[in-house]
């Protein structure tokens, strides 16, 4: 048995760390995938909130879809005051949502696609806050805008590598289209993520749905290979490690 141990980053999400040997490997890139309404953004932002409030790890949130004021409002429903963390210098939100009239980064000029501007902004916040956690929510927005997968992959690879070199653990969210059985429109997990977590919200009858979570892969970790029950509670995402979803 090797004495080498991987440093773990506790997620702070009840039940999840029990499935992944105590947390994500520090400095890794983790993909949170799922169809619309499965709780991807909640899980990712909860990771930032718990990092700042429980583990003394500041974070940076890059939002490409939902404007910050809605994120702050929605997370308050789970008792997570993001504005307070921002005021305390424990969280920075980079707004690249469509609602923003002037964005600091140009993303949408085909065939030229360069994320160096976004990289500089993220790393500046990482340095300012001494951040250890970064979330980009959601990659799907960019994936639909650019036709060249090769350019997209190369640019995202450079961005993720830079964030990792800065000592941060990166969570990416990606939406699985309703008709798609894969993990995203450009199979990002194959070239970026060392870990893939999939969230489900399946209809089980005319009147009910069942939420669940699967650790599809996590390099360097002995993780659960089962699909476990998950719920969105008043305090955010909660996983039941001992509760296996029926049929799995």
Image: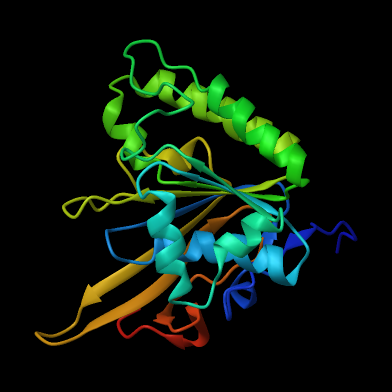
- Whether residue 219 is situated above or below residue 56 in the rendered picture: above
* Image coordinates for residue 188, horizontal then vertical, percent: 43, 39
User: Is 77 drawn above or below residue 243 in the view shown?
Assistant: above
Q: Nearer the viewer, residue 24 or 127?
A: 127
Q: Give how far across and how far down residue 33 sits, in percent.
A: 40, 55
Coordinates of residue 21 in the picture (x, y in percent): 69, 70
Look at the image and tell me in which quarter the C terminus lies.
bottom left
Q: Residue at x 74, y 34 (%)?
A: 165
Coloration of the structure image: rainbow
Answer with left or right where residue 171 lies relative to residue 50: left
Q: Is any part of residue 190 visible from this angle?
A: yes
Left/right placement of residue 84 relative to residue 196 reads right
Q: Foreground residue, 193 or 97?
A: 97
User: Total label count?
Assistant: 0
- 15 or 90: nearer the eye? 90
Q: Quadrant of the N terminus?
A: bottom right
In the depicted structure, whether residue 47 falls above or below residue 15: above
Rendered location of residue 44, percent (x, y): 51, 59
Examine the image and state in which quarter residue 227 appears. bottom left
Q: Is residue 193 left or right of residue 51?
A: left
């Amino acid at each position: 048995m090797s004495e080498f141990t991987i440093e773990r980053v506790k997620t702070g999400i009840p039940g999840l760390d029990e499935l992944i040997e105590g947390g994500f490997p520090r400095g890794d890139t983790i993909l949170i995938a799922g169809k619309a309404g499965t709780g991807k953004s909640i899980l990712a932002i909860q990771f930032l909130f718990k990092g700042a409030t429980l583990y003394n790890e500041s974070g940076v949130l890059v939002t490409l879809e939902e404007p910050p004021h809605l994120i702050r409002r929605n997370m308050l429903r789970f008792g997570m005051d993001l504005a307070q963390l921002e005021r305390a210098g424990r969280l920075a939100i980079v707004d690249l949502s469509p609602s923003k009239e002037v964005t600091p980064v140009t993303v949408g000029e085909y065939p030229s696609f360069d994320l160096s501007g976004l990289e500089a902004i993220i790393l500046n916040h990482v340095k300012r806050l001494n951040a250890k956690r970064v979330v980009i929510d959601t990659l799907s927005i960019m994936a639909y805008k650019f036709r060249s997968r090769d350019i997209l992959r190369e640019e995202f690879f450079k961005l993720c590598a830079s964030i990792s070199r800065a000592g941060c653990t990166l969570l990416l969210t990606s939406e699985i289209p309703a008709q798609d059985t894969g993990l995203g429109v450009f199979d990002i997990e194959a070239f970026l993520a060392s870990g893939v977590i999939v969230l489900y919200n399946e209809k089980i009858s005319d009147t009910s749905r069942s939420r669940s979570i699967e650790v599809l892969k996590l390099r360097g970790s002995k993780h659960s290979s089962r699909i476990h029950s998950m719920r969105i509670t008043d305090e955010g995402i909660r996983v039941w490690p001992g509760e296996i979803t029926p049929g799995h």
